[in-house]
Amino acid sequence: MECVATTAFGIEAVLKRELIKLGFDIKRSSNGRIYFETDVSGIIGANLHLRTAERVYVVLGSQKVKSFDELFDWMVELPLERYLHQKGRFIVNAKSSKSTLFSLRDIQSIGKKALIKRLQKHYGVERFPETAESYGLLLNLQNDVAELWLDTSGAALHKRGYRKQTGSAPLKETLAAAMVLLSHYGKDRTLYDPFCGSGTIPIEAAMIAKNIAPGLNRNFAFQRFFWVSKDDYNTARRNALKQIKHESIAPIVASDVDPGVIRSAKENAEHAGVDEAINFEIADFSHQNFSAASPVFITNPPYGERMGEEEVARLYKGLGKLLRKHKDASFYILTPVSGVEQLMGKKPSRTRVLFNGPIKTRLYQYIGPPPKK
Ligand SMILES: C[S@@+](CC[C@H](N)C(=O)[O-])C[C@H]1O[C@@H](n2cnc3c(N)ncnc32)[C@H](O)[C@@H]1O
């Protein structure tokens, strides 16, 4: 089967690396999408193990279409019954960019009509009760090429299930995982997140260090599909549980000035099963003592309208001081605030544009020397 894993703009390279590491055969990639070939067990594995994907879809077909008739005629010929159960509920969504067909409502409605027509012909029935499992379908048109995707994930994969409480500006779990995977963090290096909020970065880092699959705490749409065996899913889960590493790791220190968010972060870490791997502290970063050798700072400092210009300047100047003081450290600072480079007074080794949902942010990477053996 051809599948596509989607992700936020800027993270594609990280997702591609994850897929290759998991043994998938990459076919092609474009903005926010990585196409790969796999079978049913691969779909289960991708959903369970990918840390930076938003969703995994099966590509049911693709075709150049410039009219609604062409769209309908193509979809009616697709062997949809291989994937869609007669009693299923079919939810068809649409996206279109740079294409002749652009009315999402019409694309959705023609898509659904063609789907029902195909199933009517195959099953020899007129009416579909649409009472059983739901199938999320997405008709994606780009440059006049329509692709029909079937969602195998259900709720987006950033919803790991561990985060019950959040602070006011939580990071998406997928983005936090991407920051960790982009850094030089490893289980033998101390990690500091001095603005940890709900703890997303430390929790994702601990899950990476302990090789805990991100999908172990949640359900997926494919669990309801008739063509996915329960046994295969249970075996994949059991294997993922066996792969968890129980040996100890270097400290992960999660701190924040707000005692309320530290309480939430602790609870979230408990749900994720990594509370013992993280030291939580209530502290203002400017009074903290970061004493570990060759640490990695991965953090997402505060931003937003409630912060005045002076406060922003004070905070990023403080971070600049930290950067200059800890010459053996690496820093990965994610912020939507522009001009912070000047305030920090040091040029980063690299800057990347990443999106936290709709918010455009930059990851400032200050890569320190490799740790001494
Ligand atoms: C953008 S939020 C971090 C969100 C976090 N990454 C998450 O996923 O929930 C910034 C955090 O910095 C904290 N903060 C603000 N000023 C601080 C200071 N001077 N020292 C430490 N933490 C501070 C806030 O309480 C807030 O939780």
Image: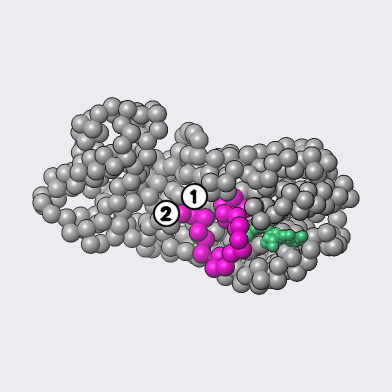
Determine if the magenta segment contains residue 168: yes
Q: Secondary structure at mark 1?
A: loop
Q: Tell me which amino acid carries mark 1.
A: Glu
Q: How many marks?
A: 2
**Measuring 65% from the left and 52% from the top, which residue is drawn there?**
304
Residue count near mark 2 (Cα–Cα under 10 Å), binned few <14, some 14–19, many ≥20: many
Q: Secondary structure at mark 2?
A: loop
Whether 167 is drawn above or below 12: the answer is below
Determine if the magenta segment contains residue 154: no
Q: Nearer the viewer, residue 274 or 310?
A: 310
The answer to whether residue 166 is seen in the rendering is yes
The disc, 2 or 1, on the residue closer to the chain's N-terminal end is 1
- The residue that label 2 is drawn on is 153
227 sits to left or right of 253: left
Which quadrant of the structure image shows residue 263?
Answer: bottom right
Q: Nearer the viewer, residue 305 or 291?
A: 305
**Measuring 24% from the left and 38% from the top, which residue is drawn there?**
75
**Measuring 79% from the left and 60% from the top, which residue is drawn there?**
285
Dominant SS in magenta: loop
The answer to whether residue 45 is seen in the rendering is no
Q: Which residues are magenta?
A: 156-176
- The residue that label 1 is drawn on is 54
CB under 8 Å between discs 2 and 1:
yes
**Measuring 29% from the left and 60% from the top, which residue is drawn there?**
133
61 sits to left or right of 302: left
Q: Tell me which amino acid carries mark 2.
A: Ser
